[in-house]
Amino acid sequence: MPTRPDDRTYATALVTAATAAPSLHNAQPWRFRYLRAEHAVELRADLGRAMPRTDPDHRALHLGCGAALFNLRVAAAHAEERADTSLLPDPADPLLLATVRLAGTDQPDREVALLFPAIARRHTSRHPFQDEPIPADIRDTLCDAAEREGTRLLFPEPWHVESLLNHVRDVEGRDTLDPERFEDIRQWTRTGAEAAVDGIPEGAFGPRRRAGRAPVRDFAGRRTVPGRPAADFESAPQLALLGTTHDRPEDWLRAGQALERVLLLATHHGLATSLTSHSLERHDLRELARDPGSAMGFVQMVLRLGYGPAGSETPRRPVSQVLEIV
């Protein structure tokens, strides 16, 4: 990571790190603008990559952009710069999601900077995890990371896990009766030798589930993927809920930053990670996802954590397509 030898090199390095973030179906719904005179980066939503069927209110879009924003903060801290971040700074411009002003070498966030190596190592894993439980101290560390971003991370009790798994089975059944629900998946999956700079290539689908109860979405759908193996997944998946008190675009952006902070920290501690938002895409099931005895008002994401393969790298658009320097 360069210490800003020139504006273009520095801005490219920041955005390269930012765009390694996860997003729904790897749609990468973001654009960046580097303001030379202000030494600042603007993050904008790219509605051309929105999903009207799966994400009509753009909640998942904000989560993905929030994750990219956190990666940018990590990269800035790694370069020993402080990143002063303003969310939704212009009410008249809702597509301007955040402005990050880079304040030289004045008090960079050392704790955040330590996560920089994990950016390149974090990949969504759609493979079976081991039955080995996550130690309590690591769980506590992940919960603290979410809290530092103004959100909550909760490891649900067994009854709650059962409920969440039932929701996944419910939505899978509903989807079979509603073929239009597969349209976004068809648009954002890449099969065969198709070259891609976005979406989910078949090499990242993971094995077909032969047994087990892990909530892993099958991006192959009804399609046959030649040579794809089958595997037994864990029967007692280790899940965590990430949530917020309110449910506004600002909360979604905070949740996206917290999500990436938790994912990078989990990667740092040797955990494999995946995300399951399938049931949260249905309004009624999302309301049922929270624990009524918890202070968590709105569930923003369900995480699956454990020990296992790290997952496959997914393609990214060239930085030149998402970065403007003015």
Image (tube, rainbow, N blue to C red):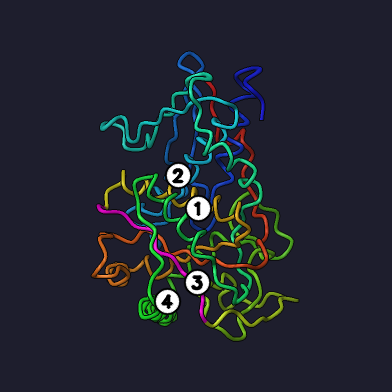
2 or 1: tag closer to the N-terminus: 1
- Badge 2 is on which residue? 65
- Badge 3 is on which residue? 238
Q: Does the magenta stretch include residue 57?
A: no
Question: Where residue 216 sits: x, y (%)?
Answer: 53, 72
Q: Nearer the viewer, mark 3 or mark 1?
A: 3
At mark 4, the secondary structure is: helix
- Badge 4 is on which residue? 168
Which of the 4 image quadrants contains residue 232? bottom right
Name the residue rendered at 47%, 63% in the picture.
Answer: 303
Asked if labels 1 and 2 touch by Cβ distance under 8 angstroms, the answer is yes
- Badge 1 is on which residue? 23
Asked if labels 1 and 3 touch by Cβ distance under 8 angstroms, the answer is no
Q: Distance between the residues labelled 1 and 4?
A: 19 Å
Question: Where residue 281 sits: x, y (%)?
Answer: 37, 65
What residue range appears in magenta? Answer: 236-246
